[in-house]
Amino acid sequence: QVQLVESGGGLVQPGGSLRLSCAASGRIFMINAMGWYRQAPGKQRELVAQITSGGSTAYADSVKGRFTISRDNAKNTVYLQMNSLKPEDTAVYFCKMVLTAPYWGQGTQVTVSS
């Protein structure tokens, strides 16, 4: 079994920064794609950013230029650096990792408010 544990969420003022982390543990041989999703109240879960095993990245248009996804394969960890945060970034953020099957983290709340 594989577990994903997220950290780094919280309350931040508009224009501020946060860094999310998601670490995988358990029976891990190789992790393929890693990604971050978010879900705001009353909305569907949406892809924020993803990174392949080769390091290729993709971002939602709404976060391009502000968010950066990265991974540390030695630590089985994916990060999301979020800068210039806006109130509309407020959501629960979930990490996802694809091994032989997809696995999800439990979610971490990010609130952007003055």
Image (cartoon, helix red, strand yellow):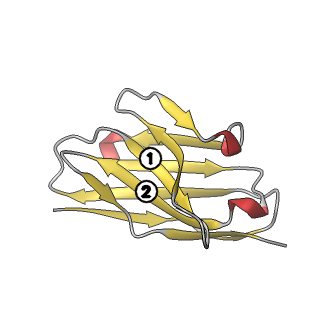
Q: Secondary structure at mark 1?
A: strand
- Does 71 appear above or below 95? above
Name the residue that disc number 2 marks. 95
Q: Nearer the viewer, residue 74 or 24?
A: 24
Task: State the image coordinates of residue 4 (x, y, percent, origin top left).
Answer: 33, 62
Q: Secondary structure at mark 2?
A: strand
6 on left or right of 100: right
Q: Residue at x 36, y 57 (%)?
A: 23
Q: Are marks 2 and 1 in contact (CB under 8 Å)?
A: yes
Q: Residue at x 71, y 56 (%)?
A: 17
Q: Looking at the picture, which amino acid does disc 1 mark?
A: Gly
- Does 92 appear above or below 61? below
Q: Looking at the picture, which amino acid does disc 2 mark?
A: Cys
Q: Nearer the viewer, residue 24 or 108?
A: 108
Name the residue that disc number 1 marks. 35
Q: Nearer the viewer, residue 39 or 56?
A: 39
